[in-house]
Amino acid sequence: MANSTELTVLLPDTPFPAIEQAWGEATPAPGLLAVGGDLSIGRLRQAYLQGIFPWFSEGQPILWWSPHPRMVLKVSDFKVSRSFKKTLKAFVNQESGCVRIDGAFEQVLHHCAHTPRQGQAGTWIVPAMQAAYARWHHAGAVHSFETWVDNQLVGGLYGVCLGRMFFGESMFALQTDASKVALAALVCFCRHHGVNWIDCQQNTRHLASMGAVEVARADFQRHLTTATAQHEIQEWVFHSGYWEEVLGR
């Protein structure tokens, strides 16, 4: 059914179809799996554990996706260019800058939804999505990594963590490289805590430049099953010593 254009319509008790039923390359929306349902924590958790995520625009029904191939950042392959390494060292060594986790989650969510992006007229982080991930954050599964300078939030990202699998959702920057700093902090945190892959969902040139690669859906699912079965991370605090993971001693 890889190239079928039939879609499962999710009712409250309808389980997700097998991910192999997602639309294939010859269809209008490769990776599209199902439509409808809700954005409850239970439904979202069920989705992410199967490698499925919601992505839709204002005025559309909820659309659920399982793309093939899948973009992931293997944290051991994170690329730090010479220029960014210099920027990162300067940030780490200044007294006015720091990285925080979950210090201002709602602000990060707001900026990710409203900061303009080149080539995009709108946002997929519609109000219903913002409310859903805020609820999941308060339930403990969604986290923000934040770049602060002079006690001002200047960049960050947020994502979902289940077991030892982190699913990156969105990032923003109000200053040059501020989102990259947050991503580098996430990579350091993941390396320290045994999170080997960060799900990036879709292929972008920006993520590829930092080491993200496409993997087959089957390979992604195998890693997902193993990683999400591991114990949850208990301490969501960024310690300055974590920078050694990418900068060395």
Image (cartoon, grey):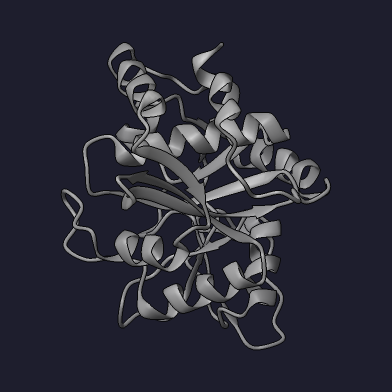
One can see residue 129 in this view: yes
Relative vertical location of residue 67 with respect to residue 180 in this rendering, above or below: below
Query: In the current view of this chain or complex, which residue is farthest to the front?
Result: 95
* Tally of numbered discs: 0
Left or right of 121? Residue 30 is right
Task: Looking at the picture, tell me which residue is in the foreground, 211 or 234.
Answer: 234
Q: Percent from the top left, x then y, of residue 36? A: 52, 81
Q: Residue at x 43, y 80 (%)?
A: 128
Q: Residue at x 65, y 50 (%)?
A: 236
The quarter of the picture where the N terminus appears is bottom right
Q: Residue at x 41, y 27 (%)?
A: 92
Relative vertical location of residue 85 with respect to residue 180 in this rendering, above or below: above
Q: Percent from the top left, x then y, of residue 88? A: 37, 24
One can see residue 24 in this view: no
Left or right of 207? Residue 163 is right
Query: In the current view of this chain or complex, which residue is farthest to the bottom?
Result: 12
Relative vertical location of residue 149 with respect to residue 241 in this rendering, above or below: below
Relative vertical location of residue 71 with respect to residue 41 in this rendering, above or below: above
Q: Percent from the top left, x then y, of residue 94? A: 35, 28
Q: Percent from the top left, x then y, of residue 142? A: 58, 61
